[in-house]
Image (cartoon, coloured by chain):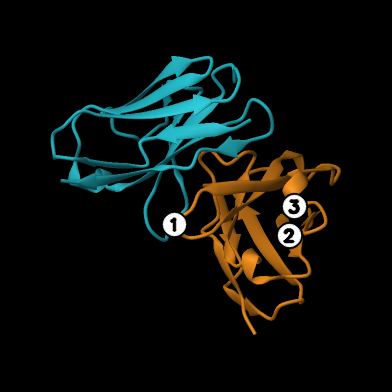
Chain colours: A cyan, B orange
Amino acid sequence: IQMTQSPSLLSASVGDRVTLSCKAGQNINNYLAWYQQKLGEAPKLLIYNANSLQTGIPSRFSGSGSGTDFTLTISSLQPEDVATYFCQQYNSWTTFGSGTKLEIK
Amino acid sequence: QVKLQQSGAELVKPGASVKLSCKTSGYTFSTSYMSWFKQIPGQSIEWIGMIYAGDGGTGYNQKFKGKATLTVDTSSSTAYMDLSSLTTEDSAVYFCARGYGFAYWGQGTLVTVSS
C-alpha cells in the first residue's frame, strides 16, 4: 500500500499550529501510526491507530482521519519538535510514507 | 523494560555477506514477532520482513527476497538478519523492531559496502 506524505518540507514558527498530511493508496482501516525521527536516532512512536496518543508523548501532538486520509497536528510548535515525521500503515504488512521534514522558521 | 540491542557498525566489501544481530530483553521473545527495516540516511524507511520467534515463520517484502534471511535463537532471545551479495545499494542503517515497530526499536546498525 503506497503512503504519500505532504509537504516534504515544512517551515513554521515556534507556537504555530502545524498540520502534516498522509494519504494511503487504499482504505487502511485506521491502522495508521505517526513517528518522529531525529538525526541518528530510531523512529519514536507518537500516534497509533490513527488517533491514539502513545504514553509519554506531549498532548500537543494529535492524530485524526480515517479510511485513506490522515493528519498529524502539533498544536503549538516547540523547538524540540524539529525532526522528520513519518506515517506508517499496518493494515497489510507495513509501509512508510516518504516523510515530512519540519524546521523552525 | 523492553530493550533491543543491535550489533555494531559493519564495513564490508561488495559481493560479501553480513549477519546482523538484535539481542532482546524485557519481554517474552519466544512468542513475539520481529521486523527488520532499512533506512538510507535522509530517506524513508523500508520494511524488509518479519519473523515469528515461536516457529521461525517468516514473511518478506518482495523487494528483499533473496537478499535478506531472517532467523532467531530463542535460547538467547536474539534475532538475526543475513544480507547476501552486498552492493553499494545495500549501504544503509538497518533497524530491528518488535512487531511492526511501534514503541520498540533497536538503535540501528550502519552497514557500509565499499571496496
Q: Nearer the viewer, mark 1 or mark 2?
A: 1
Q: Secondary structure at mark 2?
A: strand
Q: Earlier in the sequence, mark 1 or mark 2?
A: 1
A10 is higher (above) or lower (below) than B36: above
Element marked by disc 3: helix
Q: Looking at the picture, do discs 3 and 2 lie on one chain?
A: yes
**C-alpha distance separating marks 1 and 2:** 25 Å
The chain holding disc 2 is B
Q: Residue at x 54, y 25 (%)?
A: A24
Residue position marked by numbered label 2 in the rendering: B80
- Residue that appears at 51% across and 59% down: B107
Return the residue nearer the eye: A92 or B42.
Answer: B42
Chain label for disc 1: B
Q: Position of residue B70 (x, y in %)?
A: 78, 54
Which residue in the structure is indicated by mark 1? B42
- Indicate the position of residue A81 as horizontal and vertical percent values: 26, 43
Q: Is residue A84 left or right of residue B38?
A: left
- Identify the image quadrant of residue B113: bottom right
State how far apart marks 3 and 2 are (Cα). Answer: 15 Å
Whole-number angstrom distance, CA of label 3 to CA of label 1: 20 Å
Question: Same chain for the residues at labels 1 and 2, yes or no?
Answer: yes
- SS category of the residue bearing label 1: loop
Position above or below: B73 against A102: below
Q: Amino acid at mark 1?
A: Gly
> In this figure, what is the number of numbered marks?
3
Picture disc at residue B64: 3
